[in-house]
Image: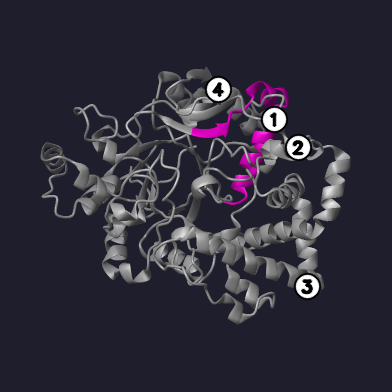
Amino acid sequence: MRLERASGILLHPTSLPGPHGSGDFGPAAYHFVDWLAAAGQKLWQILPLGGIGPGNSPYMSTSAFAGNLLLVDLAELVRHGWLQPDELAPPPGISARCLEFGAVVPFRMDRLARAAQRFADGAGAAERTDFEAFRHHHAGWLRDYALFMALAERQGWRDWCDWDAPLAAREPAALQAAGRELAERVQFYEFGQWCFFRQWGALKAYANRRGVKIVGDAPIFIAYQSAEVWARRELFELGADGRPTVVAGVPPDAFSATGQRWGNPLYRWSAHAAEGYAWWTQRIRGIFELVDIVRIDHFRGFAGYWEIPASEPTAMVGRWVSGPGPALFEAIARSLGPLPIIAEDLGVITPDVLALRKQFDFPGMRILHFAFDGGSGNTYLPHNHEPDAVVYTGTHDNDTTLGWWASLDEAQRERVRDYLGSDGQEIHWDLLRAACASVADTAIHPLQDVLGLDGASRMNFPGFGAGYWTWRFDWAQVQPMHAERLAHWAQLYRRDGTPLQT
């Protein structure tokens, strides 16, 4: 589906300012929407909204459907009377510029648990009715998720295949007994999801009223230690013991000489095909209930994916295996109609990947940091862009533009300066302007590049399992000129909704 010509900002909600250790759906998020509108930006791109997994990555979620409870605005719970104002005082170790997960996770989860208990003890009739309606609407995944999380906590987060055999195998009697024993904690997780969906729904509605659409992110894979792998093990490549036989990743590339061994279980695509891709359709439907446009991560995996034996410690040993191809997206389209989907077509892109993307009119991605290797035929150079594309300086997996610039040798820098007609003094603005001027329908700017931040503000480094996803900004870093320049470019390069003259 063709996207309207527009531009926007890449910023995950956890990177927003706020007093409780992590950005959330509170006042700073609404202020950010107002800033986007003032800056002439029509898109807010985020990372996956699911719960975090190993390494605090949002791409290793414990559920394909549930939201990240760290994003719940605690101050809103005070307004309901479920928390007291003095309970919001942050503990030691919380930083305004860095998400310190070790301090933030226990603090936020404890406060959410207090709120859940007070809701259970004294919620009003209208609140209980809304909660029950939420549980009914999300019954397809919510109960499994809440029970899985409660069990995983009790099991000290051991892999579910190591739980008592009746629970690992989901024997009905064992599930019923666990549900009774853990009823309070199960309801806590259901309550937390209700708060997440309630608050995010209000924030998204506000953004849409201000003319801002949300670009969400759908990771192709989910974590092994997740509710869906436990509940639907037949849909994943697992052995008789429940453990993965093969795992996901990519072969050696520019990011890593040994490749990237992500470790997610791979899909048993024959099982998905046998049920008409119902699970995937449900997943995509759920994501579109939260966002307006979806970026599908690692799109090339639907054409062919790198299969790594689970026993291998790196991604160097593996093989390419054919993915579901058009059948998956045809099934989704039959159920949901044409959808605004962006295909993350980075990495080893073969003709079948391009054909799959073109068949369904999904725009691909163009990264300007990749544009200056090779000659004038480099597909990432702006003069080679096509309208059905989304152009970025870099993504969450890239260094900031200033960090990238610092890593180049002088010959590479001269090539960039020559191409952009720049002296390199404001290289981040030069690249942002090139993105705006591109014929690509969509231009997305990482906020780090708008603010001119160096590599210390990088969000992620592929292949590194710890130390990332922590960056936050402060409003003191945002000056009037940032919005003014972006708004001017949105108007100058027709990313403000002006119709094309014919």
Closer to us: 57 or 334: 57
The residue drawn where x is 57% and y is 76% is: 88
**In the image, residue 209 above or below residue 383:** below
Q: Would you call the spot at circle 2 few (<14 residues within 10 Å), some (14-19), or many (20 or more)?
A: some
- Of pointers 2 and 3, the one earlier in the residue sequence: 3
Q: Amino acid at mark 1?
A: Gly
Q: Would you call the spot at circle 4 few (<14 residues within 10 Å), some (14-19), or many (20 or more)?
A: some
Q: Nearer the viewer, mark 3 or mark 1?
A: 1
Q: Is residue 286 magenta?
A: yes
- Of pointers 3 and 1, the one earlier in the residue sequence: 3
The magenta-colored residue range is 262-290
The residue drawn where x is 78% and y is 72% is: 123
* Residue linked to disc 4: 323
Mark yes or no: residue 209 visible.
Answer: no
What element does badge 3 sit on? loop
* Residue linked to disc 3: 123
**In the image, residue 120 above or below residue 213:** below
- Of pointers 3 and 4, the one earlier in the residue sequence: 3
Q: Would you call the spot at circle 1 few (<14 residues within 10 Å), some (14-19), or many (20 or more)?
A: many
**Residue 242 — which label?**
1
Which quadrant: the C terminus? top left
* Residue linked to disc 2: 168
